């Protein structure tokens, strides 16, 4: 198998909720990955009830889009019987069964195969897939696809592609947060010292004692406590490979994976639409892809991000891939809502997510790549009461805009600090 192939890769988009799944589908995903209410690594995400999962799968399948369900915890003894029941429940969701399970734990893999022999299984990046031997191992167990470890270079992925069966699939992260992973699958040693924990050379930076010193209070050491937002010293720039689609394709990657199963619909719509256009442009004509590069760069920066890096793809990261002075995102636009319906009078129904007012100039973000600047002429509640602003999160409103949007268009407004 030569890695110099030109098969269009799948665009795989995350979804934290039914609303975000629908957004991913409409804005260009070939496949969406979601978590149920158990056995995934995003416990703080909203995740999907079985009812929402069935509705989301039906919505996606009607539009030719696949849905993969994560069950990628590294399980403990007490998890296994519950996992068995969960896989049985997913199996019996017919006709709206998931297209694949994403699993990292060998015990979970074995249970899934026992309970649901015909299910397609993708091996999660959490399984630490760094070499072609590992890929071949999982292939022999019955895996269809393996997700590459984030610390692989493109050359290493090419080498894997050349040594595995043609029909085996490689999935790789191409955009989003770079994480410190689960229990022994840690990138800190590689980042700080260049010594690879996954090859037995860990310097154990997770055991080092860290403190923060505020510049106006020298000598006053404050301990670092990690919360759900992380800590600055472990704060990598976000991965972004929008400028390197040809290299990803040439390496033989079958699925381009976007990170972000806790992100908003605005993030998902922006990233899905931009990568969709970039991939399609490249396969239509490489010259068109290069000509549109400024548009991709501009659009991808309109969702939340922490500056960008190419991660490990072109060699070991250095200090320039870290952000030491902040853990906040760059946020140029604010998400207002998705157009759920448009009535005969041309009024758009949304469930509002952030405050905006009559008279504001907002933007309609369309799946085809068009952005339309419009004025909010009027708004009213479900009861027909006219209001000047929308202060209550998730309040349902009917909007009269200076140009009528379409169902599933997304509404956003430029952040005040960027105006």
Image (cartoon, rainbow, N blue to C red):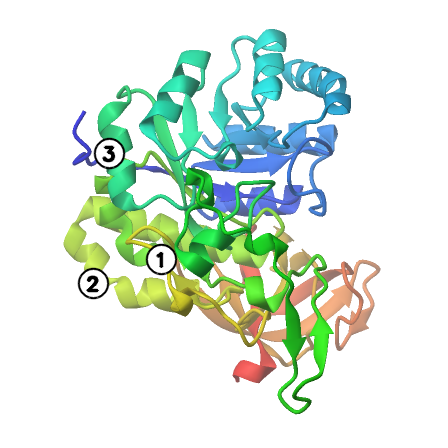
Task: Please give the name of the residue rendered at 51% of the width and 10% of the height, measured from the top-left corner.
Answer: 118
Q: Closer to the N terminus: mark 3 or mark 1? A: 3
Q: Pinpoint residue 244: horizontal percent, then vertical percent.
A: 27, 53
Q: What separation in Å lies between label 1 and label 2 (alpha carbons)?
A: 21 Å
Q: What separation in Å lies between label 2 and label 3 (alpha carbons)?
A: 30 Å
- Location of residue 200 by image quarter: top left
Q: Secondary structure at mark 3?
A: helix
Q: Closer to the N terminus: mark 1 or mark 2? A: 2
Q: Pinpoint residue 414: horizontal percent, then vertical percent.
A: 55, 75
- Location of residue 410 by image quarter: bottom right
Q: Which residue is mark 1?
A: 310
Q: What separation in Å lies between label 3 and label 1 (alpha carbons)?
A: 19 Å
- Location of residue 158 by image quarter: top left
Q: Which residue is mark 3?
A: 159
Image disc number at residue 291 = 2
- Crowd class of label 3 (few under 14; some 14 to 19; many from 20; radius 10 Å): some
């Amino acid at each position: 198998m030569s890695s110099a192939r030109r098969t269009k890769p799948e665009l795989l988009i995350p979804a934290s909720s039914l609303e975000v799944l629908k957004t991913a589908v409409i804005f260009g995903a070939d496949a969406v990955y979601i978590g149920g209410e158990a056995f995934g690594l995003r416990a703080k995400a909203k995740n999907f009830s079985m009812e929402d999962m069935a509705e989301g799968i039906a919505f996606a399948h009607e539009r030719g889009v696949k849905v993969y369900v994560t069950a990628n915890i590294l399980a403990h003894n007490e998890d296994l019987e519950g996992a068995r029941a969960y896989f049985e429940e997913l199996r019996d969701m017919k006709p709206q069964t998931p297209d694949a399970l994403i699993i990292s734990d060998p015990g979970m893999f074995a249970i899934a195969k026992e309970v649901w022999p015909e299910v397609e299984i993708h091996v999660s990046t959490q399984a630490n897939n760094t070499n072609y031997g590992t890929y071949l191992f999982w292939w022999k167990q019955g895996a269809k696809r393996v997700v590459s470890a984030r610390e692989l270079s493109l050359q290493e992925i090419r080498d894997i592609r050349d040594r595995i069966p043609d029909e085996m699939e490689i999935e790789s992260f191409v955009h989003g947060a770079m994480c410190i992973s689960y229990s022994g699958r840690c990138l800190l040693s590689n980042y700080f010292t260049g010594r690879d924990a996954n090859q037995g050379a860990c310097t154990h930076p997770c055991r080092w004692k860290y403190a923060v010193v505020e510049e106006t209070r020298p000598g006053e050491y404050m301990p670092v406590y990690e919360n759900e937002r992380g800590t600055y010293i472990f704060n990598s720039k976000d991965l972004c490979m929008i400028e390197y689609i040809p290299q990803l394709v040439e390496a033989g990657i079958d699925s381009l994976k976007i990170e972000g199963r806790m992100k908003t619909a605005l993030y998902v719509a922006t990233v899905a639409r931009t990568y969709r256009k970039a991939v399609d442009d490249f396969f239509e004509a490489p010259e068109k892809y290069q000509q549109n590069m400024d548009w991709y760069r501009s659009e991808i920066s309109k969702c939340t991000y922490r500056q960008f890096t190419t991660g490990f793809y072109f060699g070991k990261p250095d200090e320039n891939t870290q952000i030491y002075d902040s853990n906040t995102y760059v946020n140029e636009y604010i998400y207002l809502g998705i157009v759920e319906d448009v009535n005969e009078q041309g009024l758009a129904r949304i469930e509002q997510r952030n405050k905006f007012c009559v008279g504001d100039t907002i933007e309609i973000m369309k799946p085809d790549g068009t952005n339309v600047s419009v004025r909010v002429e009027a708004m009213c509640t479900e009861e027909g009461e006219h209001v000047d602003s929308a202060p209550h999160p998730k309040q349902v409103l009917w909007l009269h805009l200076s140009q009528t949007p379409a169902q599933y268009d997304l509404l956003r407004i430029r952040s005040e600090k960027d105006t």
